[in-house]
Image (tube, coloured by chain):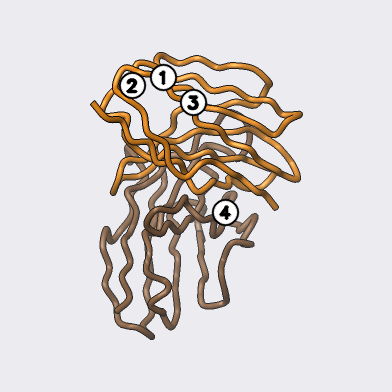
Amino acid sequence: GAGVSQTPSNKVTEKGKYVELRCDPISGHTALYWYRQSLGQGPEFLIYFQGTGAADDSGLPNDRFFAVRPEGSVSTLKIQRTERGDSAVYLCASSIERTGNTEAFFGQGTRLTVV
Amino acid sequence: GQNIDQPTEMTATEGAIVQINCTYQTSGFNGLFWYQQHAGEAPTFLSYNVLDGLEEKGRFSSFLSRSKGYSYLLLKELQMKDSASYLCAVRDMSTLTFGKGTMLLVSP
């Protein structure tokens, strides 16, 4: 696609439920990042993929969070047993590679609200 | 790990010049980015520095000193539409880490 696409744009879920957030990166981009952003804060790193593998998942807050990228393109961020504190905008970004002057392009984000 | 520090808020007047500073500590440096983010929108790329010195791009310039762990973003001829959050981000060997952002308010 022309840009990074994230679906859904908004998700409201009940506490304790399971959610999946999808990211479709720019075609050909091997690097993919997931971030979480709360109001008035900068994007907080969650996980980084290089191809199909998670090169760095040190930002995942706990084992309720998991992400996959099985074919090296689309990625899904999965959150189990959601809590109210998980409410935030989840941003996905992709870049051609992880080094050099390769800017990361962001999607519009998924606004997750846990009630 | 990384530690990125930038001011929380700044105010400036239309037509003026403003400098937004960023200091960082990182275990492996592979470039510094500045992004602009308007409220409710995704961050958009402004500039990239990997070598020391000044990079100029229209009204925006960005400076880097790797020995000092310091960068700044310079915005000239400020316009009302420049009111936004400005994010400093550092790339190490594995990821791209953002600061908390500087909210810039441009007034008439």
Q: Decide if residue A97 is in sight here.
A: yes
Q: Can you say whether B1 is above or below A95 in the image?
A: below
Chain-order first, disc 2 or disc 1:
1
Amino acid on which disc 4 is placed: Tyr
Q: CA distance from mark 3 to mark 4?
A: 31 Å
Instruction: Count neighbours of disc 2 (C-alpha within 10 A) and say few if under 14, some if 14 to 19, many if 20 or more.
Output: many
**Observer-nearest residue: A91 or A21?**
A91
- Asked whether the beta carbons under mark 3 and mark 4 sit within 8 Å of each other, the answer is no
Q: Helix, strand or loop at disc 2?
A: loop
* Alpha-carbon span between mark 4 and mark 2: 35 Å
Task: State the quadrant of the N terminus of chain A.
Answer: top left
Chain in brown, by letter, is: A
Mark on residue B17?
Answer: 1
The residue beneath circle 2 is B78
- Give the amino acid at mark 2: Leu
Neighbour tally class for label 4: few under 14, some 14-19, many 20 plus, Cα within 10 Å: many
Q: Position of residue B53 (x, y in %)?
A: 64, 17
Kindly identify the residue that appears in the image at 71 percent across and 44 percent down. Answer: B26
Which element carries disc 3, helix, strand or loop? strand
Q: CA distance from mark 2 to mark 1?
A: 6 Å
Callout 4: chain: A
Looking at the rendered structure, the number of numbered marks drawn on it comes to 4
The reply to whether dot 2 and dot 1 touch (C-beta < 8 Å) is yes
Q: Secondary structure at mark 4?
A: strand
Question: Mark 3 falls within which chain?
Answer: B
Q: Which residue is mark 3?
A: B19
Q: Which of label 3 and label 4 is nearer to you?
A: 3
Q: Which residue is mark 4?
A: A48
Q: Which of disc 2 and disc 3 is earlier in sequence? A: 3
User: Which secondary structure, mark 1?
Assistant: loop
Identify the colour of chain B in the image: orange
Residue B48 is drawn in which quadrant? top right
